[in-house]
Amino acid sequence: MRINILLSIIGFLFLFGSMQLYAQDEHPHSEEHHFQHHRIAVFTGYGLIAGAINEDGNQQVKVIPVFGFDYEYFINHKFGLGLFNDIELSSYSVEDDHQEYLERNYAFVTSLVFLYEPLIGWSLFAGPGYEFEKHHSFPVIKVGTELVKNFNHGWSMGVAASYEFKEINSSLNIGLTAGKKLGK
């Protein structure tokens, strides 16, 4: 299973790395460019939980599906704010500092991130958030990056990776995004 995930990541990076990041008609400084402040996107991918506990009580890396919905507001061509919301579509256990097991059932993570786009189609983001779960909730710091290919009429497809720093069960999320820019 790990080799399939690794091959998928390499395939996505090759696919998007070989694409031209922008076309002349999409250049933000061209006279015809129409700047759109809003972007909505969906994320689908996998989370890697390094400290999950298996049936034998040993720690292992657990791969779980993750689905997300994001809203971004760009102040200008380089800087913006985003509200990133992810739900982990699985249940698992982790061990806390007191060597007790904590159940994690379909945790929901929401984060307010600051966005920086150094190049067209490539963004970096980081910000605080909170993981909500019925047994125990945690504050989160989310850090990540996204590489997108922009299409006509504000549509985009991309790959994203983020790391969520948490008190107990930090995780790495990797997946695909599909988005739409809105506004005038």
Image (cartoon, rainbow, N blue to C red):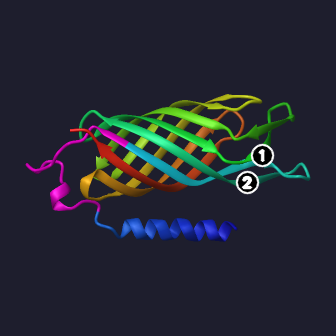
Query: Mark 1 or mark 2, which has the lower sequence index?
Result: 2
Look at the picture and state if 90 lies above or below 14. above
Residue 47 as seen in the image, left or right of residue 125: right
Q: Residue 97 in the image: x percent, y percent?
A: 80, 32
- Direction left: furthest residue: 31
- State yes or no: residue 35 in magenta: yes
What label does residue 62 carry, if any?
Answer: 2
Q: Residue drawn at (11%, 51%), measured in percent from left and top?
A: 30
Q: Residue 130 in the image: x percent, y percent?
A: 59, 29
Numbered disc 2: secondary structure: strand
Mark 1 and mark 2 in contact? Answer it, CB < 8 Å.
Answer: yes
Label 1, label 2: how many angstroms apart (C-alpha)? 8 Å
Q: Which of 47/178 is in front?
A: 178
Image quadrant in which you'd find residue 34: top left
Highlighted magenta segment, given as a residue range: 21-39
Q: Which corner quadrant holds the C terminus?
A: top left
> What residue would you read off at disc 1?
92
Q: Residue 172 in the image: x percent, y percent?
A: 60, 49
Q: Residue 171 in the image: x percent, y percent?
A: 64, 45
Q: Which of 175/115 is in front?
A: 175
User: Pointer 2: residues within 10 angstroms few (<14), some, or many (20+)?
Assistant: some
